[in-house]
């Protein structure tokens, strides 16, 4: 099949999470490959301006699921899309139903599983694979969850105890790793963000990036307890927590209780992530909750920065070499502190060493590779079907 398919990406949130970023990067990559691509999502979403900035047509979706199905069906009919691709679990069934309602021709419906856990409902685990044309797992671990199931009955986190497999034809599950913008996340010299934090060039800066909502966020509490241990031994160390959520006030109180004001800073957001990651010495990602892979780990490694992370779920798949940092069997404060102290006592990697690490990430996890592999899958799924309807540009946006 030589004709490029017309593709509709579906993301009813666009709220700023990793899944939303991946949907946008995929749409942008497919557009660069010459595909006609649109993204259906909420115009009020925080990432909606990013969609349009990249030249991707944003087709508005309403908030409630019932109206979302009919809106999607309308866009599919009017746009002549031959591939419809949903990314959030909440969009799976609306996308499947919308493709059926659009009617009249075969439409490939593809779903990506960005989470390291099973679909939440029995109905989805039993019928989702049968009702779609394929599911993309973003890591080998996610593939294992979907095909074999993962059971950890003694886990303290309820999400980790039972992750049953889906039912159906497992040949329809495809593994395509996520992609990052390696042209943006690359090593640069200097520390452009440090003056705004009040940190000096000689400080060793450790950062945790991720949402901080109860019950455990991304392990912020263990990180701060480890920070107190490390700072007591190495006073030149400093610590950053980047992310927002319901734990923010609690974490601010924790910083004071541990005697870390001025040494540990809480930042709710950052609009310059490549500069942020280039200004730290090490990213810390405790093994908490579930992790499909860890996009921020890839971004830090692409900037040539070492990472300390818990060896849970898909995280080890992000470690592209043994020079990428340290994987921990457990993420207790003592284990984190020991690893942080070891990194703090090392010589900083040279710029050439950082670029070598960047190259290893770029060879496996670039957004270009993501788009190429996904397009190849679209073509395989479309192969043997009747020629798709010629693509028509969707009409101007309308309210639903």
Image (cartoon, rainbow, N blue to C red):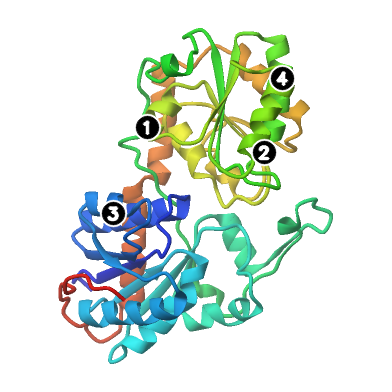
Label 1: which residue? 272
The crowd level at tag 3 (other Cα within 10 Å; few <14, some 14-19, many 20+) is many
Mark-to-mark CA distance, 4 and 2: 15 Å
Q: Are marks 4 and 2 in contact (CB under 8 Å)?
A: no
The x and y percentages for residue 327 are: 65, 34
Q: Are marks 3 and 4 in contact (CB under 8 Å)?
A: no
The x and y percentages for residue 248 are: 61, 37
Q: Are marks 1 and 3 in contact (CB under 8 Å)?
A: no
From this view, report whether residue 93 is shown above or below residue 228: below
Mark-to-mark CA distance, 4 and 1: 27 Å
Name which of mark 2 and mark 1 comes first in the sequence: 2
176 on left or right of 118? left
Pick out the residue farthest to the bottom.
104
Name which of mark 4 and mark 2 comes first in the sequence: 2
SS at mark 1 in the image = loop
Name the residue at 17% across, 76% down: 391
Label 3: which residue? 51
Label 4: which residue? 228
| Displayed quadrant of residue 80 | bottom left
| Displayed quadrant of residue 41 | bottom left
Name the residue at 51% across, 14% down: 348
SS at mark 2 in the image = loop
Label 2: which residue? 219
From this view, report whether residue 352 is shown above or below residue 236: below
């Amino acid at each position: 099949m030589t004709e490029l398919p017309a593709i509709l990406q579906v993301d009813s949130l666009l709220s700023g999470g990793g899944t939303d970023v991946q949907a946008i990067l995929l749409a942008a990559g497919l557009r660069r490959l010459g595909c006609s691509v649109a993204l259906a999502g909420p115009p009020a979403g925080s990432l909606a301006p990013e969609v349009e900035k990249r030249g991707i047509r944003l087709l508005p979706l309403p908030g409630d699921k019932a109206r979302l199905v009919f809106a999607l069906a309308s866009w599919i009919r009017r746009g002549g899309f031959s591939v419809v691709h949903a990314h959030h679990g909440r969009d799976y069934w609306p996308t499947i139903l919308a493709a059926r309602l659009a009617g009249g021709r075969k439409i490939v419906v593809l779903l990506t599983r960005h989470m390291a856990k099973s679909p939440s409902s029995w109905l989805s685990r039993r019928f989702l694979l049968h009702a779609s044309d394929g599911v993309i797992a973003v890591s080998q671990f996610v593939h294992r969850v979907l095909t074999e199931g993962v059971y950890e009955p003694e886990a303290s986190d309820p999400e980790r105890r039972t992750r049953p497999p889906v039912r159906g034809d497992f040949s329809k599950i495809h593994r395509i790793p996520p992609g990052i913008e390696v042209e943006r996340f690359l090593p640069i010299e200097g520390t452009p963000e440090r003056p705004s934090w009040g940190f000096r060039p000689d400080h060793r800066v450790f950062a945790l990036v991720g949402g901080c909502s109860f019950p455990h966020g991304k392990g912020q509490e263990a990180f701060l307890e480890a920070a107190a241990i490390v700072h007591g031994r190495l006073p030149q160390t400093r610590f950053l927590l980047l992310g927002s959520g319901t734990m923010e006030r609690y974490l601010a109180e924790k910083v004071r209780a541990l005697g870390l004001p001025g040494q540990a800073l809480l930042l709710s957001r950052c609009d310059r992530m490549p500069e942020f990651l280039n200004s730290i010495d090490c990213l810390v990602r405790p093994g908490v909750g579930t992790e499909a892979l860890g996009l921020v780990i890839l971004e830090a490694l692409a900037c040539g920065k070492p990472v300390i992370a818990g060896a849970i779920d898909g995280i080890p798949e992000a470690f592209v070499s043994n020079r990428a940092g340290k994987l921990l069997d457990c993420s207790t404060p003592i284990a984190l502190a020991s690893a942080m102290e070891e990194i703090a006592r090392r010589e900083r990697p040279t710029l050439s060493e950082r670029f070598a690490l960047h190259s290893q990430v770029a060879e496996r996890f670039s957004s270009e590779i993501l788009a190429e592999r996904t397009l190849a899958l679209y073509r395989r799924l479309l192969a043997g079907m009747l020629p798709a309807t010629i693509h028509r540009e969707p009409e101007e946006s309308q309210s639903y």
